[in-house]
């Protein structure tokens, strides 16, 4: 059996209403609470959306994480309310699909990243790096929605060596 480096999936169950989980991804105000330092959503006419306004198909985004200089840009390509969101990621080279599956008291969130190039740089940075990153951020979303806490560090500081 050979490993498929072109895609990966992350799954998590969250005890929260499906609407609340879905909406956590839809506006600047929500997504910067648990995931990003800054974001900018721009509609298809070039108008920047207000912090409370939900994104729509055709919108573009800019995302900046706490402690990173990197700016991610992409496009929203599918929205099915409370069911599914698809957007481009990693310089529009891959697609990310979020599915929300209601199981009564819990919602299963499935994140699938596809179309990952299979050169060594993308296998390490986009496949392995994003897989680890998305896994953490989905746990952070669960912690925020279920317990009202955030696990990410919002301070910008350099890590210290253990032997110092």
Image (cartoon, grey):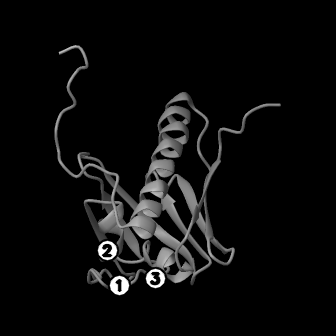
Check disc 1: other Cα within 10 Å, few if <14, some if 14-19, many if 20+.
few
Could you classify mark 2 by the number of other residues whose Cα lies within 10 Å: few (under 14), some (14-19), or many (20 or more)?
Answer: many
Cα distance between the residues tagged 2 and 3: 12 Å
In x, y percent, where is residue 141?
44, 62
**Residue to which mark 1 is pinned:** 45
Please tell me whether mark 3 sits on a helix, a strand or a loop. Answer: loop
Residue 31 shown left or right of residue 146 in the figure: left
Foreground label between 2 and 1: 2
Q: Kindly identify the residue that appears in the image at 40 percent across and 81 percent down.
A: 44
Tag 3: Cα neighbours inside 10 Å, few (<14), some, or many (≥20)?
some
Q: Which residue is mark 2?
A: 28
Q: Which residue is mark 3?
A: 56
125 in relation to 55, above or below: above
Q: Residue at x 31, y 80 (%)?
A: 46
The reply to whether dot 2 and dot 3 touch (C-beta < 8 Å) is no
Quarter of the view holding residue 54: bottom left
| Earlier-in-chain disc, 2 versus 1 | 2
On the image, the x and y values in percent for residue 12 come to 59, 58
């Amino acid at each position: 059996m050979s490993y498929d480096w072109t895609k990966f999936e992350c799954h998590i169950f969250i005890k929260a209403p499906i609407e609340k989980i879905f909406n956590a991804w839809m506006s600047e105000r929500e997504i910067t609470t648990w995931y990003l330092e800054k974001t900018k959503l721009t509609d298809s006419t070039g108008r920047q959306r207000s912090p409370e306004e939900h994104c729509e198909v055709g919108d573009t985004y800019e995302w900046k994480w706490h402690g990173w200089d990197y700016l991610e840009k992409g496009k929203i390509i599918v929205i099915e309310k409370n069911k599914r969101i698809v957007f481009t990621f990693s310089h529009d080279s891959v697609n990310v699909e979020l599915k929300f599956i209601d199981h009564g008291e819990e919602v299963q969130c499935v994140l699938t990243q596809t179309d990952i190039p299979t050169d060594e740089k993308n296998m390490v940075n986009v496949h392995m790096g994003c897989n680890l990153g998305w896994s953490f951020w989905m746990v952070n979303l669960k912690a925020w929605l279920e317990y009202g806490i955030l696990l990410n560090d919002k301070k910008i500081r350099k890590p210290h060596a253990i032997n110092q």
